[in-house]
Amino acid sequence: MQIDTLKKITLLGLIFGIIANFLFHFLYEWTGDNVAVGLFAPINESVWEHGKLLTFPFLFYAVIEYFLSKPKDKVNYLATKFFIITIITILLPVLFYSYSGIIGQSFLFVDILIAIILIVISYILSYLFINNNYNFKHKYTIIAIGLILVLAYFVFTYSPPNIDLFIPSF
């Protein structure tokens, strides 16, 4: 694949990611609290549920990108995407709780800025890994961790543990 093509696909993904992040935030409410939609879109204002705003638009676009880019190493492509969502899912609560813990409160502007920064990071990392043909050493382990994370989003949507990460805080 030509580098320019990958750049265009990545840029489209970045735009899609930012728009989808906004739309997914309200999707559950707009669909009348549809249970199926709640698996992919936040059902409350917890930090955990907001992780869906980064994860699922990224994964949905990864499917589109897959067909547009036709990667040669399909397993490594999946590993790349699951590695990124794992990193982003870890970074979101770390950044949120770090700044809000230091300041003593959260600010919507900063929360939105963190989301945008993480979306940009996810697409930059994706581009760099794919463009440089980065070959993950433990592809299947990364994919398994990513699938467990997606499953955790589904399970904890309607059966969350009673810890701060899952309690609405916004």
Image (cartoon, helix red, strand yellow):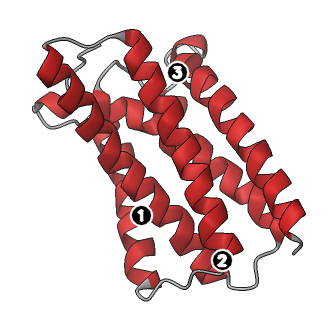
Q: Nearer the viewer, residue 9 or 41?
A: 9
Nearer-N-terminus badge (3/2):
3
What residue does disc 3 label? 25
Q: Which residue type carries mark 2? A: Asn
Quadrant of the rendered structure where residue 127 is? bottom right
Q: Is residue 128 above or below residue 55?
A: below
Q: Position of residue 46 (x, y in %)?
A: 29, 24
Determine the CA span between mark 1 and mark 3. Answer: 22 Å
Which secondary structure, mark 2? Answer: loop
The residue under the point 88% across, 62% down is 4
Q: Nearer the viewer, residue 135 or 61?
A: 135
Q: Is residue 158 above or below residue 168?
A: below
Q: Which residue type carries mark 1? A: Gly
The residue under the point 39% across, 57% down is 86
Would residue 66 appear left or right of 148 to someone viewing this image? right
What residue does disc 2 label? 132
> In which quadrant of the rendered image does the C terminus lie?
top left
What residue does disc 1 label? 146
Which secondary structure, mark 3? Answer: helix
Q: Position of residue 22 (x, y in %)?
A: 59, 21
Quadrant of the rendered structure where residue 149 is? bottom left
Q: Which residue type carries mark 3? A: His
Q: Position of residue 53 (x, y in %)?
A: 50, 33
Would residue 129 appear left or right of 65 to someone viewing this image? left
